[in-house]
Amino acid sequence: MKSQKVKVGLIGLGNIGKTHIKNLTTTEQIELVGVCDLVREKADRFAAECETTAYYSHSELFRNSGLEAVIIAVPHYSHPVIAVDAFRQGIHVLCEKPLAIHVNDAKLTIAAYEEAKQKYPELVFGMMFQERTLPFYKKIKEIVDSGDLGRLTRASWINTAWFRSQAYYDSGDWRATWAGEGGGILTNQCPHNLDFYQWVFGVPARISGHAHIGKYHQIEVEDEVTAYFEHESGMVGHFMVTTAESPGVNRLEIVGENGRLLFEKDKLLLFRNRISMLQHLQETNQGFGNVEFEEIEIEVDKDVPTGHKVVTEKFVTKVLTGQGELIAEGTEGILSVTIANGIMLSSFNKQMVELPFDSDQYERILQDLIASSKFRKAAAQVIEADISQSFSK
Ligand SMILES: NC(=O)c1ccc[n+]([C@@H]2O[C@H](COP(=O)([O-])OP(=O)(O)OC[C@H]3O[C@@H](n4cnc5c(N)ncnc54)[C@H](O)[C@@H]3O)[C@@H](O)[C@H]2O)c1
């Protein structure tokens, strides 16, 4: 009979690694068989704390720990490399966001997963999109999926609650560089928002992106982005994000013919039209008057488990039993990467991008940016951070 615990290894013991350690050591179905970091001192320290074994490379962890599943929590460029190695050895993967820096690497990771499944049909691949567990976001998705808003015309998301200081960017050599991180706010902070956007509305058909590089911070990647999306359905989207606004705001508006949904400050309001606005605009003989509407506050049960722990629990349940749904399938990780790359490609080329776009062209631009980079980082400083403050507000 299969063991009742999944043998899990964790790679990457930085900011988010600490959150994973907490979850892994308090989840009954998990046996933490090894922790791994290139920095030996970190691996040794966390291994001692968790009474497990330290490894200093993922290959060594894969070879010697007897793990069945791995959580990948290292800087983004290494996500595909480690995931592909894991799949080839039949190791289940829960990958931190983003799946990859660019679409080509995301495709390659998914291809390795599909290929490995021929040999290991039970292989599980999940993405750490823990924001899908947030009660308001779940409710918004439920309302949109129900079709109650009718034909959608607009979705506008201002998310500037991602404030980051210069000290944050200086805190790691890899951060906010083309070579180390491959992007700025779209690659680091916004994968959750982009995933939520595509989860609810799908991937746009056309993207117009306007990204400002190092506008407020001494960094070589984007810290302020405005994007305009067009969907096949006719719906338009707006996406406005920055790490340089304080106090920031997280305001999402979704407009359909039957009303407008507004999420802001832990409040979800529905302005519900008495009749379809599209019908009204065709049929009324009045030139100006609005459609009659009522304002309803949507009740949302906030007292439910959320976050990384829920994603991890669903993942190990699937590994153990083959049953249940993941919060996010690994293969869905490519969708937010596609939107992020599409925005940047449009911004670099100063023209609207049709999807699917030329992912080789995007990769080439990225390689050129890396090759021509003259940016030198100030010596990395360690800042003590409570990572939970970085999660979505
Ligand atoms: N889901 C979330 O909300 C969330 C939050 C924060 C970070 N993240 C993601 O987690 C990843 C790590 O972010 P972080 O802020 O913890 O970074 P970090 O720099 O604080 O930590 C990364 C750690 O990985 C180690 N490392 C680097 N390459 C490695 C390798 N090849 N093998 C083993 N160890 C290696 C480093 O030594 C470091 O200890 C990023 O991809 C980030 O996007 C996700």
Image (tube, rainbow, N blue to C red):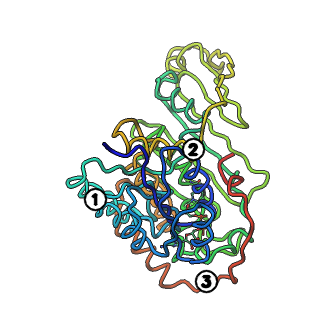
Q: Earlier in the sequence, mark 1 or mark 3?
A: 1
Q: Position of residue 216 (x, y in %)?
A: 72, 68
> Residue flagged by tag 1: what amino acid is it?
Ala
Taking depth in this image into account, of 305 and 178 the one nearest to the observer is 305
Q: Quadrant of the C terminus?
A: top right
User: Cβ of disc 2 within 8 Å of ligand 1?
Assistant: yes
Query: Which residue is at 49% across, 31% downward?
Result: 152
> Residue flagged by tag 2: what amino acid is it?
Glu
Q: Residue furthest right?
A: 247
Q: Are marks 1 and 3 in contact (CB under 8 Å)?
A: no
Q: Position of residue 116 (x, y in %)?
A: 25, 57
Taking depth in this image into account, of 181 and 275 the one nearest to the observer is 181
The 10 Å Cα crowd at callout 2, few under 14, some 14 to 19, many 20 or more, is many
Query: In terms of secondary structure, where does tag 2 sit?
Result: helix
Name the front one of labels 3 and 2. Answer: 2
User: Cβ of disc 1 within 8 Å of ligand 1?
Assistant: no
Query: Which residue is at 46% across, 65% downward?
Result: 101
Q: Does 110 sit above or below residue 142?
A: below
Pointer 2 residue: 131
- Label 2 to label 1, Cα distance in Å? 26 Å
Name the front one of labels 1 and 3. Answer: 1
Taking depth in this image into account, of 60 and 50 the one nearest to the observer is 50
Pointer 3 residue: 375
Query: In terms of secondary structure, where does tag 1 sit?
Result: helix
Pointer 1 residue: 111
